[in-house]
Amino acid sequence: MHTSSTLVLVLAVFGASLVEMVEALTLVVAAGVSRGWRSALEGAAAAVVVLAVLVLAVGVPLIRYVPIDALRVIVGALLLVLGLGWLRKAILRSSGHKAPHDEDKIYDETVAELRADPSAAPARRAKGRDPVGFVVAFKGVFLEGTEVVLIVISLGAAQHRLGLAALAAGAAVVLVTIVGVIVSRQLSEVPENTIKTVVGIMLSSFGVFWVGEGAGVRWPGSDLAIPVLVGFFLVVFFAYTTLLRALLPTAPDAVAEEAAAA
Amino acid sequence: MTDAVARAVCWFGRFLWDFVIGDTPELALATGVIVAVAFLLDGSEWLGATLLPLLAAGFLLASTLRGRRRAPSRPTGR
């Protein structure tokens, strides 16, 4: 395996994990602030353990028992669906057709929802364990983390680098945890859309590469085709964003369209 | 125990459906087409290496254009 594709693998897994864990952190902090920290942290830790077990339970047998070409096609297809989806969302957000992801808004809504629950009485929170806080934190980390697990297993299995992929994801989890503990709030300053764009580009590149490789297409330059594909999808992202910005309707256009529709 | 396993399997099935199909079924379809084309191009070099990324970019454009239907309006004079 070439160094450049290893680097892209690490960056893709690290970036994807970073984005998902920042989203998970918002829910953990919301649960901690409104329902007590002990339960929120226990819920988050339990989810991380379950996710790690999933990586081992699914990833290792995949590498050992599934023929590599079949694995690459399946994994490539999975990465392509995910990567194109992330890229699509990033293009729509960058061009103004979709509202950016707002961690502050999600945090405020979650806190308000949890505080509205009558079982969130301060006396009860002070005692320690709170099942609602535990479940919210667990679900937040588990749901965001499942996507990371699929990326880790896919990229790791296709390149026979499951350990490295898991390590990159683990590093992102540790980084977000440390920063989260230090600032003790949601990380709304993280340029989530930019990271999501970069990861979308990388996942799409890996997806196309592995689908082709698994199906028997011979890539010129072998693994060196991956950075070329990354460059290609980067150009595609900027071109489409520019095109869609130009297609953004002006206010009178929108009014006219609505009137025509009515 | 069996109920818990069944619930977990159902949940994972729903998660996978949302993950692969979700609100962009055209991208799942596009991926299927790309996989099929890749198998048709088995053994090719430049043709496959050129066509597969172009196909992905083409499908991405179609899906993105579909996604802009509910576009917000932009104020005039910008």
Image: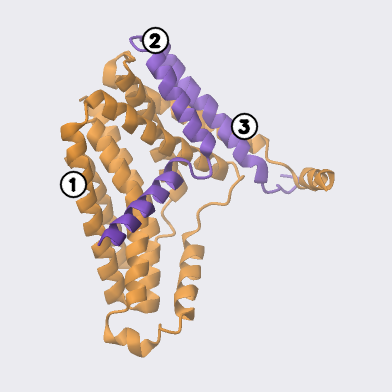
Chain colours: A orange, B purple
User: What chain does badge 3 belong to?
Assistant: A
Q: Is residue A18 visible?
A: no
Q: Which residue is mark 2?
A: B46
Above or below, B9 against A46 in this view is: above
Quadrant of the rendered image containing residue A61: top left
Give the residue displayed 37% in from the left and 35% down from the top. Answer: A79
Q: Which residue is mark 3?
A: A243
Quadrant of the rendered image containing residue A73: top left
Percent x, y of residue A136: 37, 68
Give the residue displayed 54% in from the left and 25% down from the top. Answer: B58
Residue type at numbered disc 2 = Trp
Any mark on residue A56, and which? 1
Mark nearer the viewer, 3 or 1: 1
- Category of crowding for the residue at label 3, using alpha-carbon neighbours closer than 10 angstroms: few (below 14), some (14–19), many (at least 20): some
CB under 8 Å between discs 3 and 1: no
Give the residue displayed 62% in from the left and 37% down from the top. Answer: B66
- Category of crowding for the residue at label 2, using alpha-carbon neighbours closer than 10 angstroms: few (below 14), some (14–19), many (at least 20): few
Q: Nearer the viewer, residue A160 or A234?
A: A160
